[in-house]
Image (cartoon, grey):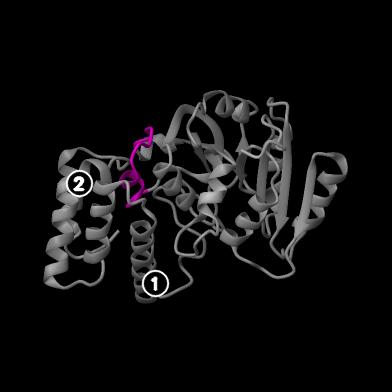
Amino acid sequence: MNTQLDPSLISVVLAACNGARYLAVQLDSVFAQTYPNIEVIAVDDASTDDSYRILQQYAQRHPNMRVYRNEENLGYIKNFERACSLAQGSFIALCDQDDYWVPQKLERLAANIGKHPMIYCDSAICNEDLQPTGVRASDRAEMIDITNCLQQAVVCRVYGHASLFVRQLLQQAAPFPPALPHDWWLCFVAANHGGIAYLPEVLVHYRQHDNNAVGAIGERSRHSGHRTALHRKWSEVKAIRCRMNLFYKTCPDTLVQEKGVLKNLAESYGSFSLWHNLKRVQVFMNNQSQLLAVKKGNGLRKYIFCLKMFYRIR
């Protein structure tokens, strides 16, 4: 660890883009945190609404906030990467522009991270007006301690807005690849370097609306209806193949079993030939306890999911 860093400072890293409608609620909840030592790093991604102005207004009132603006739109992945690179804390908390943090969020995560490189909590899924739907993220996925990178290879339910991680993780994760969301990538890297702790407490109200970058489980992602179904399908297939190849290549050689499984998955994802389809089903069947560890459902549902891998990839 860099000895010049404040060992207790948490950097709240906010990536904003046309979020003027929701920013005030999110920022108010950040500055209401009970954890006493935070800085807020906000990077506006060339917004065309009042987001940048709102960020500047908050920075004028809070000396522990710094605001930056991209001259051109980088997209949410690279915007978060830039924001993280500007952080000075020993811990980093990713912050979306449209949620609400319970006041004790950072305090509880910091108190429970221990020696793990990352920790995450549960979230209450809310509607566009931030009213709870009565559903938690843990109702839709198995929220568990992550001890194996295979548990993050196919399904990731560790959301960035619910996480806290050590700064050293950036050294292993940068640059963020474009093939998958930044929080999924950070989780995979963390799983390879010490694992992820889970705190079973609802500390975030997770707002769902049409412009979410990534929706909650079972919700629609941003602009998903703007492309034809066929174009969307093949774009997703390409991205999934890139993700699995990336996971295989970056998995440490010391993790022999995990790297072997990822290699077989990456190879089977290469095409929908009969051989690859059969191989893919076999890999899922043999490793479903790890690959589907965070997926809700009984043994039968997971068995059926494995069979479906004959004609699809995930």
Label 1 and label 2: CA atoms lie apart by 26 Å
Identify the residue at horizontal 51%, vertical 26% (top origin). Answer: 114
Identify the residue at horizontal 33%, vertical 51% (top origin). Answer: 253
Label 1 element class = helix
Query: Any mark on residue 287, and which?
Result: 2
The residue range painted magenta reads 142-155
Name the foreground residue: 184 vs 3.
3
Identify the residue at horizontal 53%, vertical 58% (top origin). Answer: 176
Task: Please say if the residues under marks 1 and 2 sit with CB atoms less than 8 Å apart.
Answer: no
Marks 1, 2: nearer the viewer:
2
**Coordinates of residue 80 in the picture (x, y in percent):** 61, 55
**Coordinates of residue 160 in the picture (x, y in percent):** 53, 45
Query: Any mark on residue 132, and which?
Result: none
Judge whether residue 147 is colored magenta.
yes
**Coordinates of residue 281 in the picture (x, y in percent):** 15, 57
Please indicate, yes or no, whether residue 294 appears anywhere in the rendered image. yes
Image height check: is 66 above or below 75?
A: above
Query: Any mark on residue 235, and which?
Result: 1
Classified by dominant secondary structure, the portion drawn in magenta counts as: loop
Sequence-wise, the earlier of marks 1 and 2 is: 1
205 with respect to 263 (left or right): right
